[in-house]
Image: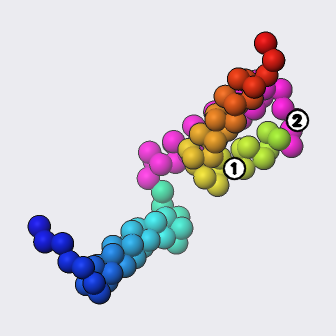
Amino acid sequence: MHVRIGRVTGALALRAVLSKTRRVLIFLLLGYVPMVLLLTWLVSLYLAFIETRQRHMDWRHTLWWVQLTFLFHFAGYLVLRGWVFYRRNRAPA
């Protein structure tokens, strides 16, 4: 495998990014989403809702966390889990 430096690599990198972008845009334009992706998205939303309900959060905070998970998928849920972990460890014993 040869590594090229310069314009050729930049063009190849741009082409690779655009091809990946087209694959993601196909979900938005056609409305077709693989079932596995949809299932993991729904599971992350459910887990975010359950986590906020267990913490006895106000409905506005629950809605905020669920929307964050809606927008960022599992990354949003992982941020929620990190925040809960931080709050638990910071709380006085």
Residue 74 place in picture, x, y as percent: 56, 44
Q: Is residue 43 highlighted in magenta?
A: yes
Residue in the picture at 88% in, 35% down: 58
The amino acid at mark 1 is Leu
Label 2 secondary element = loop
The answer to whether residue 5 of the structure is visible from this angle is: yes
Name the residue nearer the viewer: 11 or 41. 11
Residue at the (48%, 70%) spot, across then down = 25
Residue for badge 2: 58
Residue pushed farthest bottom?
Answer: 7
Q: Quadrant of residue 8?
A: bottom left
Residue 20 colored in magenta in the image = no
In this view, 64 is above or below 46: below
Residue at screen point 54% across, 67% down? 28
Q: Main secondary structure of the magenta part?
A: helix
User: Colour mode?
Assistant: rainbow
Counting from the top left corner in percent of width and height, residue 54 is at 76, 24
Residue ID at (39%, 68%) = 20
Q: Alpha-carbon neighbours of circle 1 within 10 Å: few (<14), some, or many (≥20)?
A: some
Residue underneath mark 1: 68
Q: Is residue 76 above or below residue 11?
A: above
Q: Position of residue 91 (x, y in %)?
A: 79, 22
Q: Position of residue 76 (x, y in %)?
A: 63, 46
Mark 1 to mark 2 CA distance (whole Å): 16 Å
Q: Amino acid at mark 2?
A: Asp
Secondary structure category for the residue under label 1: helix
Q: Label 2 near label 1: C-beta < 8 Å?
A: no
**Residue 89 horizontal side relative to residue 21, left or right:** right
The quadrant in which the N terminus is found is bottom left
Q: Which residues are magenta?
A: 34-60
